[in-house]
Image (spheres, rainbow, N blue to C red):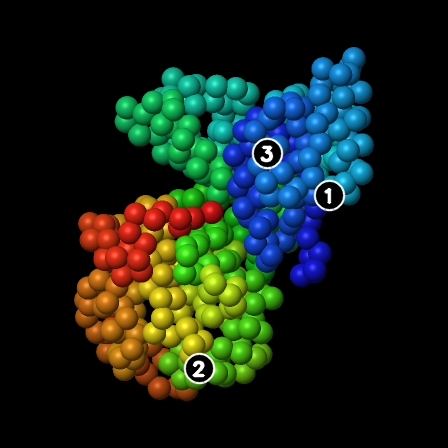
């Protein structure tokens, strides 16, 4: 999909619209490849309508009580969607059973999110049924809609472990958090035309090659936006390559990188390679924006994700000269560490740098990371020379103290306006 054309979404709701909010948040990023053009509810008092209005999104109310038949109700809903030029319909807590004619009319353009790992526990009361069945893994599913209840080709699933002694409310809260991460991911894949349905099974095409059609947060990193008062980290897109190339030319960062970034073409290749890794679920590259100006000031990344070991690396970082030595880098690291430890459940975060890069070593140490050793002649650089690599680490036990120091350093204190979307 071209950079100027965003997939037009229509979201159907009946209640509070928390999954709608997750989509609103995702679409607020100009680089996200979709936009919500209509939010429609069958209930005038649905809280989700207020969410849409606050975001400046058009709304419509079509009450099922005003129609003698389900077919006439669905026809009115379809008319509203078509008037808004909706291209993909997203069900987000829409508590009406749609007629076969509606489902068939929107075939492969109608998706739903369901709070279970389908085909297990279709229908209602999924969390109570999961606990009663004694399953060890629960979760959510985004799928294309077919005529049978909660059926259709699965796009993505997020697995949520069931803890010993879990209550229905506690399990539901964790599943809902997974839904908020997973629904925007599925919409992104569709908007980027990565989904193909083959014999009623979904294949997700990566930038190169094919990514698994079913992922979970334990297996892959989900694109997200991280922000505080200092910086905004947005998922890297190919459209960011020119701005990053401007930075590499100005900063002279290329000589310390393992990849040659001395030309615009090389930066474009580097960005495409990063997107390939993201498609495979092992890396989450960000572009760093100055929160005050919105300008691109650098890039950073979570990568080398080892799900089984609960270990991840922060790196692949460079900044424009005017951002160096400011609050930009510690704020970005603070957000990445928070996401790693508190969202991904990491027990260890690694950072590494060229042993000759005194500025980088000092910055990492100032974060509170422990220098763990030097690997000699560890990595070949773009110019053909070999670098000694210094490794640093932060563990989950150390994270609270590191977080407190960073909060004090950045003047965050008890201000929890940071958001991980």
In the rendered view, does 189 fall on the left or right side of 104? left
Question: Which numbered tag is attached to residue 50?
Answer: 3
Which residue has dot 1 on it? 87
Eye-nearest disc, 1 or 2: 2
Of label 1 and label 2, which has the lower sequence position? 1
Q: In the rendered view, tell whether residue 78 sits above or below residue 225.
A: above
The x and y percentages for residue 102 are: 75, 28
Residue at position x 68%, y 53% from top? 6
Instruction: Tell me whether circle 1 and circle 2 mark residues in contact (CB < 8 Å).
Output: no
Question: Which numbered tag is attached to residue 251?
Answer: 2
Instruction: Tell me whether circle 3 and circle 1 mark residues in contact (CB < 8 Å).
Output: no
Secondary structure at badge 1 equals: loop
How many angstroms separate mark 3 from mark 1 (CA)?
Answer: 23 Å
- Other-residue count near label 3 (Cα within 10 Å), few / some / many at <14 / 14–19 / ≥20: some
The x and y percentages for residue 39 are: 66, 35
Eye-nearest disc, 3 or 2: 3
Residue at position x 31%, y 60% from top? 410
Residue 372 seen by the camera: yes
Q: In the rendered view, tell whether residue 237 sits above or below residue 19.
A: below
Eye-nearest disc, 3 or 1: 3
The x and y percentages for residue 118 are: 52, 29
How many angstroms separate mark 3 from mark 2 (CA)?
Answer: 45 Å
The x and y percentages for residue 394 are: 24, 58
In the rendered view, does 211 fall on the left or right side of 408? right
Of label 3 and label 1, which has the lower sequence position? 3
Residue 111 seen by the camera: no
């Amino acid at each position: 999909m071209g950079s100027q054309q965003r997939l037009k979404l229509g979201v159907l709701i009946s209640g509070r619209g928390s999954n709608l909010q997750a989509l609103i948040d995702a679409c607020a990023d100009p680089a996200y490849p979709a936009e919500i053009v209509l939010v429609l509810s069958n209930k005038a008092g649905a809280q989700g309508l207020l969410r849409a209005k606050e975001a400046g999104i058009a709304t419509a109310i079509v009450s099922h009580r005003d129609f003698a038949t389900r077919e006439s109700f669905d026809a009115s809903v379809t008319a509203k969607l078509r008037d808004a030029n909706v291209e993909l319909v997203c069900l987000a807590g829409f508590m009406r059973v749609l007629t076969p004619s509606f489902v068939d009319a929107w075939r492969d353009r109608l998706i739903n999110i369901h709070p279970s790992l389908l085909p297990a526990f279709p229908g209602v009361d999924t969390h109570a049924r999961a606990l009663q069945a004694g399953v060890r893994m629960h979760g959510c599913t985004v799928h294309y809609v077919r005529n049978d209840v909660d059926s259709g080709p699965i796009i993505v699933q997020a697995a949520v472990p069931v803890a010993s002694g879990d209550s229905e409310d506690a399990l539901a809260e964790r599943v809902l958090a997974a839904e908020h991460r997973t629904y925007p991911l599925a919409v992104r894949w569709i908007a980027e035309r990565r989904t193909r349905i083959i014999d009623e099974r979904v294949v997700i095409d990566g930038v190169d090659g094919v990514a698994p059609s079913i992922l979970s947060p334990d297996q892959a990193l989900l694109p997200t936006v991280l922000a505080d008062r200092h910086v905004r980290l947005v998922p890297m897109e190919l459209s960011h390559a020119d701005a990053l190339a401007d930075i590499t030319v100005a900063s002279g960062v290329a000589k310390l990188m393992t990849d040659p970034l001395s030309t615009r073409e090389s930066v474009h290749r580097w960005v495409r390679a990063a997107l390939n890794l993201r498609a495979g679920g092992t890396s989450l590259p960000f572009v760093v924006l100055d929160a005050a100006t919105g300008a691109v000031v650098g890039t950073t990344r979570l990568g080398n994700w080892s799900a089984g070991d609960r270990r991840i690396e922060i790196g692949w970082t460079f900044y424009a000269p005017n951002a160096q030595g400011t609050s930009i880098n510690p704020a970005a690291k603070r957000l990445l560490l928070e996401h790693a430890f508190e969202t991904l459940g990491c027990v260890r975060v690694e950072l590494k740098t060229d042993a000759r890069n005194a500025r980088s070593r000092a910055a990492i140490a100032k974060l509170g990371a422990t220098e763990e050793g030097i690997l000699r002649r560890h990595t070949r650089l773009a110019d053909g020379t070999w670098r000694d690599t210094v490794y640093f680490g932060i563990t989950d036990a150390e994270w609270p103290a590191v977080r407190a120091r960073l909060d004090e350093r950045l003047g965050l204190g008890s201000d929890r306006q940071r958001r991980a979307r």
